[in-house]
Amino acid sequence: MKGMRLSALAAAVLATVSVSVQADFLNDSSLDIKLRNVHFDVKTDTPGNDWSQWAQGVQANFKSGYISDAIGFDASYYGALKLNHTGKDPFSSTMDGGQLLTKDYKSYHKFGQAYLKAKFGDEQQGFYGQAGYMSGQKGLILGSGSRSTPSSYRGAHGEVYVQDFTVYGTYVDRISMRTENSWDEFKTKSGDTIKHAWQVGTLYQANNVDAEVVHLQSKGFHKQSMLNLGYTFDLAENTSLIVSGNYHYAKGSGSIWNNNLNDKKESLNAFDDKASHLNLNTELKLGGLGLKLSYATTDAEKKGGLGYLKYTYCDNEYGASPSAVSRYWSDFMFDGEKVLQVQGSYDFADLNVPGLNVSLTYTDGSDIKDQGSDKMTGENETDLIISYAVQEGTFKGVSFRAIKAWHTEKYDTKKDIESEHLRVYLDYTVKVF
């Protein structure tokens, strides 16, 4: 009888703990739906290359609480509905992925994320990790979030942090491109398969210092290392000077790289053997006014062609460029290219219009070393960005952003090529619970 009473007590305790664990898991969970209405319009003076796309993107993002304050599960469902499409985007056929719609200009839907997550420790020191289907996190595996929905990877990511210092690592072996519903192997331009990629890095952010070092390798194809450094000088109230730099080094490595290099009139690789990119920036902030000056240079020789530094580790992945001079039409990373960029921005909160921001950027690249038949010698791009986020009232959380880019490619063997690119985003996130 006593044993039965103890068993009943144990069952009651376990039930109470189980209810408590489930309560923590559910009470700390959230579901939001992000709606993105986005329109791209491209016009060039090259016949047949004008196109536009208009889509309604949807992201349903579930984030769980943690069971026993340690284990959880997150998932995201992505989709985009085709609203309009005109012309043929010449880049979709070469990149294996579309712009706002699939590469064959259709709507799509997919599970974009589904991963287990774990955490240990507290805010000062501990561990965080996740494994499954996920978006990029840090370093050189970041993915792209500038289309209807983001790109995703299959793999694992973990980081150990002690106060302001973090050490992280990432392993990935599949990609779901930003507008495709499949999970694909990493590929080169020749169709060779890259089995996986991994990176390790360190990050420090404190005491006005922002520093990161990361090394990445894609199996049999690519090695990359990157250093980011920045320091903020607090000159006066609402006045600061930010100096920063980025150095990126890439090297072809392995049989897959060599297969794309040998026995061809022109290599399919971005450069012959190695490439580097140096970017230096100075930014002055005076209240809402920002003034920025950037310089960059690239070394990426390619015999018989136009070399460039490829900051992604395969040819069907589109990550975010780490360089400040990378723009909306061009990355300004061609071989020999010397880049000067000036930027002005203003936050209208100082004029009692919070949420309104405007920036104007001019980027000029010269001294390009093009060894191809049509020799590109330089380029320039002007970018105007206007953004506004509603701060209060019924439409709080609605944000609008319009980007207009004008780009010119300069040649010594033919006339210059002019292009115009318009991007318009209307975003709104609905919190379900």
Image: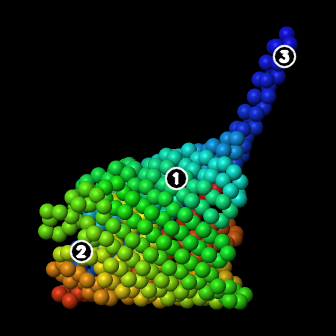
Residue 183 visible from this viewpoint: yes
Picture coordinates of residue 124 (x, y %)? Answer: 71, 59
Q: Residue furthest top?
A: 1
Q: Which of the marked residues, 2 or 1, is nearer the chain's N terminus?
A: 1
Instruction: Using the image as rendered, state which of residue 394 and residue 51 is in the foreground.
Output: 51
Residue that numbered label 1 is attached to: 157
Q: Amino acid at mark 1?
A: His
Q: Which mark is residue 335?
A: none
Q: Is residue 132 above or below residue 280?
A: above
Q: Amino acid at mark 3?
A: Arg
Q: Is residue 268 left or right of residue 81?
A: left
Q: Residues within 10 Å of mark 2 (few under 14, many from 20)?
A: many
Q: Is residue 298 left or right of residue 123?
A: left
Do labels 2 and 1 touch, CB within 8 Å? Answer: no
Could you tell me how far apart the alpha carbons at marks 3 and 2 are, in whole angstroms? 80 Å
Which SS class for mark 2?
A: loop
Residue that numbered label 3 is attached to: 5
Residue that numbered label 2 is attached to: 302
Q: Is residue 291 above or below residue 177?
A: below
Instruction: Using the image as rendered, state which of residue 61 and residue 255 is in the foreground.
Output: 255
